[in-house]
Image (cartoon, coloured by chain):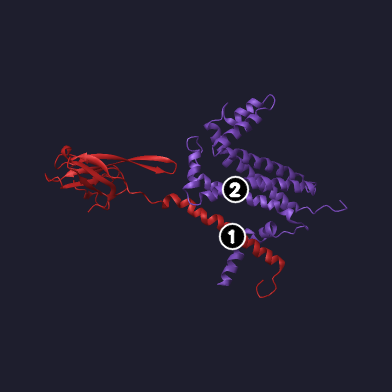
Amino acid sequence: MSGSNRFSRRDFIKVTTGAIGGIIAAGVGIPSIGYLLAPALRQDQAGKSVVVANLSDIPIGIPYPFSFTITRINGWERTANVFGGFILRKSEDPQDLLVLSSRCTHLSCRVNWDEQAGGFLCPCHDAMFDKEGKVVHGPPPEPLGHFEYEIDDAGNITIIPIERKGE
Amino acid sequence: MQNFWKNALQWLDERLGLNELYQNLLDRPEPLGNWWNTLGSASLFLFLLQVATGIFLTVYYNPSPDHAYDSIQYIMNEVAFGWLIRGIHHWGASLMVLVVIIHMLRTFVTASYKYPRELTWLVGVGLLLLTLGMGFTGYLLPWHQMAYWATTVGTQIAGSVPFIGEFILRALRGGPDLSALTLQRFFAAHIWILPALMFALIGLHLYLIIKHGESHFPDKED
């Protein structure tokens, strides 16, 4: 082919076959990438806010555990996941609250409040967070996350179930 | 730079025999023929297309009575290009049965099954039966009414064989009734057992074709 202007029958067939084959491969191959990645590219819907506790039940200065369930439709199935956290009343002021997530910022294990240790302990890699979620020791790179909350007149605490980065 | 690629290619060729492979597989001499001679390649192409789209379908398909139908609805309505992948697999299946049968008829009409190609023919018959088996097992997988009753009837027909019919029916269904076991074993047959056999037989079929070359059309001498 190269160097000569003559384009033989054989070369024509070869090029045409290659081109058509390429088009077919691209026609199946490119949509396939979208097909495989579709669930990964789906946007998560913002969760509905949930009532998790009442102010009157929460002691001052001791983290109060709560949990809530979020049901998501994944593909052809509804999946319910339980999430949890701790509410810390720092003072008598009803607005002086900290709503922490119990998800360890290292590798997502669930931390537990340990009264004796005076902190949150992670069972997986022996990490410890203080009452306000700051790292005391262990591998976590950042403090525990927290949830935004609202309190109504009856003292019900409502959170938006999207974890925010701890400060 | 051009030299580098040339050298690299030559290095590989000396060790892998790429040129020889190319000559034998794609550039071998053929007798004078026509479009009817391309049906074997068309079958192979369709088979590979079914393999590719079938693998993609298993990413989302779930072979259980609870979820089979829903997972296919999900593929069709939610997954990007799911309709395309399943559409190709669905129509490709029918087309493959058609092409394989016409391929067999062409071989018969041009008497290409004669010496030394009898084994190529026999292997081809095996491939035809396996293709039909793929159609039969694949038809149940959507687990909708049509699939369910078609397989009820199909397995019942297999059950009408004298003496061993009842046994065949139970073996196909995995018990007396069409159940989760039927769906699961049809799925296993459809994605593992039959394709594995097909790959083996296609390999043999191609080897025999390359070994003997393609037959020329019969003339007055024959």
The quadrant in which the N terminus of chain A is found is bottom right
User: Does residue A2 appear to the left or right of B61 in the view shown?
Assistant: right
Query: Alpha-carbon distance for marks 2 and 1?
Result: 17 Å
User: Does residue B38 appear to the left or right of B111 in the view shown?
Assistant: left
Apparent colour of chain A: red
Q: Is residue A99 visible?
A: yes
Apparent colour of chain B: purple
Q: Is residue A129 visible?
A: no
Quarter-of-image position of residue B175 = top right
Instruction: Identify the residue at horizontal 65%, vertical 65% (top origin).
Output: A15
- Dot 1: chain letter: A
Instruction: Identify the residue at horizontal 28%, vertical 49% (top origin).
Output: A163
Residue that label 1 marks: A23
Q: Amino acid at mark 2?
A: Gln
Which of A139/B221 is in front? B221
Image coordinates of residue A3 in percent, x first then y, are 66, 75
Give above or below for B110 relative to B129: below
- Dot 2: chain letter: B
Residue that label 2 marks: B50
Image coordinates of residue A85 in percent, x first then y, are 25, 43
